[in-house]
Image: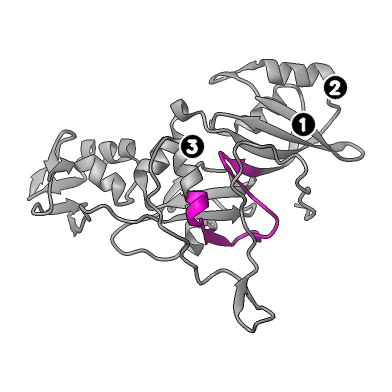
């Protein structure tokens, strides 16, 4: 059975459908030696070339992987950087026949939860504004935050790229000039959390994403490490965008830390990311390490 080229590329983990359409429009793909068009359909008998290199696509329903990664500050969310800075992809396991698609980028100075998946359709759905997937962040604010500021941020303010607001703001403590707040919003615009606080004359001195949809980050997963979501977690993530689960079970990855159990067998120390149906993580401990 044939399938649209941009869809099969996305399903094989080359990127989102929208990105694959751009690749086709940019002339990067050939079908049987001829320039591909956005509406073209292909099947297993067609010869597909990307940047003049033949690629193999899996047309069967394949089992995908989803990784959760605890991003440290100082890493960038892109594969190619002219400055040669550390990137989040360098620590991921190598794949054959597919590639990792990042879900919900973070800027270089923001740490915390990132997803990577081989399912481009899932990545596209999670990032699409219509899905309204909520993101939760822990923000350390430098300055005086009064009731009027909180009211403004929950009611909404006008930024340079449009109206924005926090769905909720929770004071989670702190002393002196720095105070921690847990904030939730349903968008992923560039530096949106920081820009919202800055609109009130305040500075975000630390920022960590602690939850994305139903999956939250716990302290057990050390910064700079990753693990696969298990079946229950993957099911919750797919369900958040109305898709059936394409992950059958957890695949243990070699970078997870191990320690001997009482029975002498290895068990994971990487910690679990709990599946939560939108519950706030306001009681999560603040990160203790300073910049």
Quarter of the image for the N terminus: give it: top left
Residue 83 visible here: no
Q: Which residue is mark 1?
A: 170
> Depth check: 151 or 220 in front?
220
Q: Residue at x 49, y 68 (%)?
A: 253
Residue 220 part of the magenta segment = yes
Marks 3 and 1 in Cβ contact (< 8 Å): no
- Please provide the residue range marked out in magenta: 209-234
Please name the residue that numbered disc 3 is placed on.
240
Taking the spot 65% from the left edge, 82% from the top edge, the residue there is 263
Residue 19 horizontal/vertical position (percent): 33, 39
- Label 1 with label 2: CB-CB less than 8 Å: no
Q: Residue at x 73, y 38 (%)?
A: 139
Tell me if residue 25 can be seen: yes
Q: Which is nearer the N-term, disc 1 or disc 2?
A: 2
- Residue 46: x, y in percent? 9, 52
Position above or below: 182 against 103 = above
Q: Nearer the viewer, residue 282 or 277?
A: 277
List the residue tagged with mark 2: 146
Question: Residue at coordinates 14% horizontally, 47% vertically from top-left?
Answer: 30
Helix, strand or loop at disc 2?
Answer: loop
Above or below: residue 251 compared with residue 287? below
Q: What whole-number distance in Å separates the C-alpha atoms at marks 1 and 2?
A: 13 Å
Which mark lies nearer to you, 1 or 2?
1
């Amino acid at each position: 059975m044939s399938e649209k080229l941009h869809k099969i590329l996305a399903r094989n983990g080359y990127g989102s459908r929208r990105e694959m359409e751009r690749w086709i429009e940019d002339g990067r793909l050939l079908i049987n030696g001829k320039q591909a068009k956005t509406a073209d359909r292909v099947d297993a008998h067609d010869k597909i070339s990307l940047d003049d290199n033949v690629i193999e696509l899996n047309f069967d329903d394949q089992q995908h992987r989803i990784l959760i990664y605890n991003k440290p500050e100082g890493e960038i969310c892109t594969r190619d950087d002219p400055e040669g800075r550390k990137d989040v992809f360098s620590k991921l396991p190598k794949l054959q026949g597919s590639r990792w698609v990042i879900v919900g980028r973070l800027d270089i100075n923001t740490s915390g939860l990132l997803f990577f998946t081989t399912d481009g359709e899932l990545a596209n759905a999670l990032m699409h504004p219509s899905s309204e997937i909520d993101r939760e962040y822990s923000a350390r604010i430098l300055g005086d935050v009064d009731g009027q500021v909180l009211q403004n941020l929950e009611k909404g303010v006008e930024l340079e790229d449009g109206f924005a607001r926090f769905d909720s703001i929770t004071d989670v403590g702190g002393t002196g000039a720095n105070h921690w707040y847990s904030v939730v919003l349903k968008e992923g615009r560039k530096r949106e959390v920081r820009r919202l606080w800055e609109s009130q004359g305040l500075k975000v001195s630390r920022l960590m994403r602690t939850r994305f949809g139903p999956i939250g980050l716990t302290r057990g997963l050390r910064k700079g490490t990753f693990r696969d979501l298990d079946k229950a977690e993957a099911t919750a993530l797919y369900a958040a965008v109305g898709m059936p689960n394409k992950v059958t079970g957890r695949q243990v990855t070699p970078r997870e830390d191990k320690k001997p159990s009482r029975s002498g067998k290895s068990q994971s120390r990487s910690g679990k990311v709990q599946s939560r149906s939108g519950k706030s993580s306001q009681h999560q401990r603040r990160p203790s390490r300073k910049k």
